Image (spheres, rainbow, N blue to C red):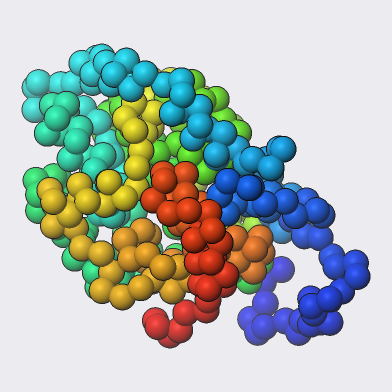
């Protein structure tokens, strides 16, 4: 299950030109590309990550009649959403939860990237909320990522910085890489699970704000629901969680660790979260979500700095730049799904009208799958 040295790989199974190549992760055998952006039907949806084991089949976005779910959502938003009405809903939500007694009234998780800065700054300065920001520390901060983190807090926010046990985090990252080829999974657990859990159990904060909904990227969720579905961060029994594809009980038994070492990676129980009355909302449901405009907002209002160099695997400098592990993470998604960082960035920019699909395809061909050795 866990190998101290690399396993020998039969490369003949993966060579170019095979007539009947193996199909992994339950992906579609026929690859279909969206005719409007650069997505394909190989792109995995956001799922209940705590159930992910080696044999898990990944649900993917739909491409029907040549158009992917993400583009359909984008068209729906342009044609059907009354953003003034949505903002009134946001104001009503804030009025419901706002506190004037000195307590925090909302919890905002983030690393100090453009999205978390935008969410916290807008809620505090435009809508009068009193947020506590929460950071699950990245694996290894980039220099510019840590600078942005400090700039974010120095614009006027309290921050709860949670740094997981480095020995445990390294172990879980290695297990996730070797067993699932998913080195980012332990961080994803902390990023997704910690905020709802602490809000409900420790901080007594009834409102958590996330950035944009996975609908923006093709997830098959309810387009009219502003809340994050608790299935993504709750489980009936947290001890049934799998980390790195290995059940918690087996991790404790086989790796000489105890239950407390893993508590920060576990989702809250469904029953406990429901009892708390805490709600998790997407700000992107109430306000138009435009990554490039959010980048400019963070620069103008918070001294956010892009990376000093082009991000390997793509052409941009401002998205997912705080963690050195990002480079490897996106390289593994390219290997597994044929979806690299340039595909991720370009598909969004096509939908926002910033580049044409032809330009996007050329960028994907040039940068997707580029291996980075800059942090080795």
Q: Using residue 92 as the reference point, say whether residue 13 is left or right of it.
A: right
User: Residue 264's spot in the image, x, y percent?
Assistant: 42, 50
User: Residue 23's spot in the image, x, y percent?
Assistant: 81, 60
Instruction: In this rendered view, identify the residue nearer to me: 79 or 291.
Output: 79
Up/down of 351 relative to 23, above or below: above
Instruction: In this rendered view, identify the residue nearer to me: 136 or 154.
Output: 154
Q: Residue furthest right?
A: 19
Q: Residue at the spot x=57%, y=34% of the render? A: 72
Up/down of 149 relative to 97, above or below: below
Q: Is residue 134 visible?
A: no
User: Residue 104's spot in the image, x, y percent?
Assistant: 18, 31
User: Residue 7's spot in the image, x, y percent?
Assistant: 72, 81
Q: Residue at the spot x=53%, y=73% of the render? A: 366
Q: Using residue 103 as the reference point, say whether residue 200 is left or right of it.
A: right
Up/down of 245 relative to 205, above or below: below
- Classify the position of the C terminus by image quarter: bottom left
Q: Examine the image and state in which quarter residue 338 appears.
A: bottom right
Disc tally is: 0
Instruction: In this rendered view, identify the residue nearer to me: 61 or 367.
Output: 367
Q: Using residue 66 as the reference point, say whether residue 173 is left or right of it.
A: left
Q: Residue at the spot x=31%, y=61% of the render? A: 318
Q: Residue at the spot x=66%, y=60% of the render? A: 337
Q: Is residue 376 visible?
A: yes
- Classify the position of the N terminus by image quarter: bottom right
């Amino acid at each position: 299950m866990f190998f101290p040295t690399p396993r020998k790989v039969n490369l003949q199974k993966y060579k170019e030109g095979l007539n009947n190549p193996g199909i992994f992760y339950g992906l579609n055998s026929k690859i279909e590309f969206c005719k409007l952006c650069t997505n394909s039907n190989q792109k995995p949806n956001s799922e209940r990550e705590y159930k992910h084991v080696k044999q898990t089949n990944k649900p993917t976005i739909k491409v029907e009649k040549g158009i992917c779910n993400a583009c359909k959502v984008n068209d729906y938003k342009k044609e059907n959403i009354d953003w003034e009405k949505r903002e009134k809903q946001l104001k009503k939500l804030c009025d419901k939860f706002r506190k004037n007694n000195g307590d925090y009234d909302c919890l905002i998780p983030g690393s100090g990237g453009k999205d978390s800065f935008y969410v916290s700054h807008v809620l505090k300065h435009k809508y009068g909320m009193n947020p506590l920001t929460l950071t699950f520390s990245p694996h290894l901060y980039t220099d510019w990522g840590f600078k942005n983190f400090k700039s974010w807090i120095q614009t006027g926010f309290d921050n709860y910085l949670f740094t997981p046990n480095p020995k445990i985090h390294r172990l879980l990252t290695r297990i996730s890489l070797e067993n699932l080829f998913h080195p980012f999974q332990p961080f994803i657990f902390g990023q997704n699970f910690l905020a709802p859990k602490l809000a409900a159990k420790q901080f007594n904060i009834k409102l958590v704000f996330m950035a944009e909904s996975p609908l923006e990227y093709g997830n098959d969720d309810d387009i009219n629901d502003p809340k994050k579905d608790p299935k993504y961060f709750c489980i009936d029994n947290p001890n049934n969680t799998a980390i790195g594809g290995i059940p918690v009980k087996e991790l404790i038994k086989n790796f000489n660790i105890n239950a407390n070492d893993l508590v920060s990676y576990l989702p809250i129980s469904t029953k406990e979260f429901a009892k708390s009355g805490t709600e998790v909302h997407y700000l992107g449901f109430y306000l138009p979500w435009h990554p490039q405009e959010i980048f400019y907002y963070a620069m103008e209002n918070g001294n956010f700095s892009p990376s000093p160099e082009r991000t390997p695997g793509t052409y941009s400098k401002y998205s997912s730049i705080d963690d050195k592990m990002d480079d490897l993470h996106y390289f593994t998604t390219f290997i597994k799904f044929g979806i690299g960082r340039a595909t991720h960035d370009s598909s969004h920019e096509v939908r926002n009208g910033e580049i044409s699909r032809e330009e996007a395809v050329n960028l994907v061909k040039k940068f997707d799958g580029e291996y980075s050795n800059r942090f080795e």
